Amino acid sequence: MEQQKILKAFIVFAVVLSFLFPAMAAAPVGASGKWSGAISVTDQAGQTQSQPVFLILTQDGKKLTGSGGPSEDEQGFNIENGTVDGNKLSFDVNIEDTSYHSTAQFTESEMTGETVRQQTNGVKITFKLALQRVVAK
């Protein structure tokens, strides 16, 4: 009799878990966190130049805010007009006479996309963006 109660309880527990795990697995991954990597551009001669980038992002629903710079300790710009739609994000950065517009897709561990630099004199350059999520130690 006692074994039947334990078996029934175990079956109920297993059924409940089977409904919970797919829902947890389907939960979207957010953009919030620290991201480290680089932007790079290939010139006409085929030479690739890259610069380090470190972003600290905060996602609140579809709104994205944060800061960035070459390292975690050197955050020199603020994220503006940031949005998140599923696993896609976009944001702007304005530094002096230059604006940057970034679009990217992200997963739990990486972010890839492009950043377009538009100067007030009309010069436009597109950079590749490749970042990895920084995991807390």
Image (tube, grey):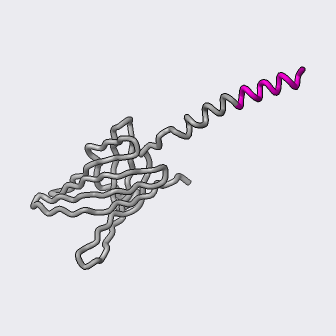
Instruction: Give the percent coordinates (x, y) of residue 86.
Output: 39, 41
> Which residue is depicted at the point 35% across and 41% down?
85
Quadrant assignment for the N terminus: top right
Farthest-out residue, bottom: 45
In the depicted view, which residue is nearer to us: 60 or 26?
26
97 on left or right of 101: left
* Residue 10 lies in the magenta-colored region: yes
Quadrant assignment for the C terminus: bottom right
Q: Main secondary structure of the magenta part?
A: helix
> Which residue is depicted at the point 31% across and 42% down?
83
70 on left or right of 108: left
Q: Which residues are magenta?
A: 1-14
72 on left or right of 82: right
> Which residue is depicted at the point 33% across and 43% down?
65
Total residue callouts:
0
29 on left or right of 113: right
Q: Quadrant of residue 74?
A: bottom left
Instruction: Give the percent coordinates (x, y) of residue 9.
Output: 77, 25
Farthest-out residue, left: 121
Q: Quadrant of residue 19?
A: top right
**Above-or-below relation of 25 to 70:** above
Instruction: Give the percent coordinates (x, y) of residue 53.
Output: 36, 60
* Residue 98 lies in the magenta-colored region: no
Instruction: Give the percent coordinates (x, y) of residue 16.
Output: 66, 28
Farthest-out residue, top: 1
